Image (cartoon, rainbow, N blue to C red):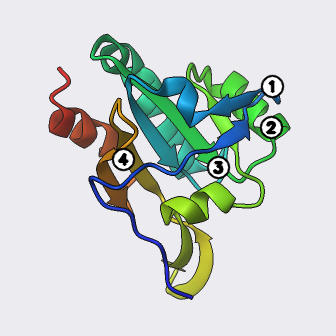
């Protein structure tokens, strides 16, 4: 199976997914503003907590620059609600239980974990421009330091 890899200039695949409270959230709800869509493997795990808290801690400066943030994982909404509440996350967490959206973005596929090749969520971040095209497509990002790099690349102080 060939993995889909998106690149800047590609159209961002549309989606509608349930949030932590089971309410549908669509990418089209964010049309007209820059939106960070990031995919992470599992709520409440160390790396994913580091990354989510980093987005939380930088959210006000991202929002001041007109940038919204959406986090997507294969977790059920109830698990996302626990994660949100435990870590006081202040941006939408969306549930992609069957990994369809992850696959459309190329954020699910072969990856190495502890030296073994397996199928799973590839930690990835995308910046969707106001017109729905991709400004950035970043695959295999590190949980630590990623948000600072992203802020720098987006010119967010």
Q: Is residue 67 above or below residue 40?
A: above
Q: Quadrant of residue 108?
A: bottom right
- Element assignment for label 2: helix
Closest to the observer, 15 or 69: 15
Tell me the SS state at disc 4.
loop
Along the polypeptide, which appears first: circle 2 or circle 1? Answer: 1
User: Which residue lies under the disc numbered 3?
Assistant: 73
Mark 3 to mark 1 CA distance (whole Å) = 14 Å
- Label 4 to label 2: alpha-carbon separation: 25 Å
Labels 2 and 1 touching (C-beta < 8 A):
yes
Cα distance in 3D space between marks 3 and 2: 10 Å
Residue bearing the label numbered 1: 21
Secondary structure under the numbered disc 3 in the rendered image: strand
User: Which residue is disc 2 drawn over?
Assistant: 77
In contact (CB < 8 Å): disc 3 and disc 1: no
- Residue 4 percent coordinates (x, y): 47, 72
The dot on residue 144 is 4
- Percent x, y of residue 100: 68, 60
């Amino acid at each position: 199976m060939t993995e889909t890899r998106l690149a800047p200039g590609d159209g961002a695949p549309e989606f509608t997914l349930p949030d932590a409270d089971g309410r549908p959230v669509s990418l089209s709800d964010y049309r007209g503003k820059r939106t960070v869509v990031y995919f992470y493997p599992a709520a409440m795990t160390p790396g994913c907590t580091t990354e989510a808290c980093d987005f939380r801690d930088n959210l006000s400066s991202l929002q001041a620059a007109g940038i919204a943030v959406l986090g997507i994982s294969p977790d059920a909404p109830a698990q996302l609600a626990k994660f949100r509440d435990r870590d006081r996350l202040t941006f939408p967490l969306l549930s992609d239980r069957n990994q369809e959206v992850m696959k459309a973005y190329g954020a699910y596929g072969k990856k190495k974990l502890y030296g073994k090749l397996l199928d799973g969520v590839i930690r990835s971040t995308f910046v969707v421009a106001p017109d729905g095209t991709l400004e950035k497509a970043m695959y295999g990002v590190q949980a630590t330091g990623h948000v600072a790099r992203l802020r720098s690349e987006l010119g967010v102080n």
